[in-house]
Amino acid sequence: MRPPPPANNPPVSSALTPAENALRAEKESLERTVAENMAELRETKDYLENLLGYANAPIIVWDPSFKITRFNRAFERLTGRCAEAVLGMELSFLFPPDSREDSLAHIRRASAGEYWETVEIPIQHADGSVRLLLWNSAVVRSPKGEQIIATIAQGHDITARKKAEEALRLSGEQLRALSVHLQSLREEERTRIAREIHDELGQLLTGLKMDLHWAETRLEELKEPRLNPILDKLVAATEVADATITTVQRIASELRPGVLDRLGLMMALRHEIDQFRQRTGIVCHMDTPEEEPDYAPELATAFYRIFQETLTNVARHAVASAVQVAFRGTGAWHTLEVRDNGKGIDEAALTSPHALGLLGMQERAHLLGGTVAFQREATGGTIVTVRLPAALPHQPAYD
């Protein structure tokens, strides 16, 4: 008996409604799109992984629990550790023990922020050495932004730069210490020369003047007309001796004013302003405290020398008719202010490398931990403000 012929079953789609067919087609299209997107995401992920791995800059990624999830080859070279050994480990183990807490505090702030933050964080190499990194970090959030997925940080090794900066800083300190020492030696030498000029040369000239006066007196007693030309020569020689004594006294005072050592800074400033008034004819007013402030001799010398240079600049450049001076010495700082009504300091002179007088004033104050500021007033004139500490700053000692 032959079997019955098979039933003529129609395709499944023919049994579906048009709406069901459309839904099925849309599902198949969506599945294809998802598959294509997943393939593209895998390719992108592989590309980013390769990019991360071969980047020249050290890059590290950690999750919200501060466990390392990515660690590129540059970071491996920096730390001497392979990625397989550190993935999943706490981030803190990369930091030196003595700076671990501070580093973690920086990391927590970076991981909680919305924007890139740059911080300096030390990293410990596997051999125990420490490298300093300048880290730029940013958080990666979920698509909707409701939670942090990870934090990615890129580092730049600045160890060599920091060592160079530290070497430069130490060199600057050494140069400043040397400058302070040289300034002190120069003032001591000026004091010694001024004393020798005043005492030795001054006494010799005074003795010469007395001898000339003695000879003049004895010749006058002879009342011999033929001796009159000799008397005239003796009188002229006496006048030359007087002028020489005055010049010697002036040179000795300019080298080191005795009033600064004998009577203190306030009297030295008043003496200098009196001499300035007599030389220039400029009206001067000075306001100083009644009692001498307490300060180290080096600070008094610095104030006096800067004051001298300031008055010299006023005489040469300011075209001023009046100068006001004020000294305030209270607390931890002493301030000397010199104000003139001249044409005002040229702004270009403040930054000119050829303004050696201004640079010298600033450097002299800086060596002692102070400042010199120059301000041009809107109505003309210049204000020079010298600010020095009441006590000498600590100077580093070098062998």
Image (cartoon, rainbow, N blue to C red):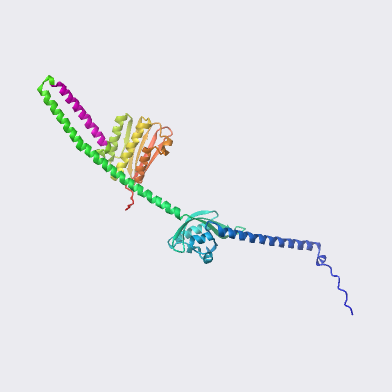
Tally of marks: 0
Relative to the observer, which residue lies in front, 14 or 322?
Answer: 14
Q: Residue furthest left?
A: 222
Relative to the observer, which residue lies in front, 63 or 156?
Answer: 156
- Among the 4 quarters of the image, the one containing residue 303: top left
Q: Residue furthest bottom?
A: 1
| Res. 146 in view | no
- Among the 4 quarters of the image, the one containing residue 151: bottom right
User: Which residue is located at x 18 percent, y 24 percent?
Assistant: 233
Name the main secondary structure of what is drawn in magenta. helix
Please give left or right for residue 366 compared with residue 25 in the image.
Answer: left
Residue 103 rendering spot, x and y as whole percentages = 47, 59
Q: Is residue 228 part of the magenta span, yes or no? A: yes
| Res. 220 in view | yes
Of the 4 image quadrants, the one containing the N terminus is bottom right
The part of the chain drawn in magenta is 227-253
The relative height of residue 188 versus residue 82 in the rendered view (above or below) is: above
Residue 16 rendering spot, x and y as whole percentages = 81, 65
Relative to the observer, which residue lies in front, 92 or 112?
Answer: 92
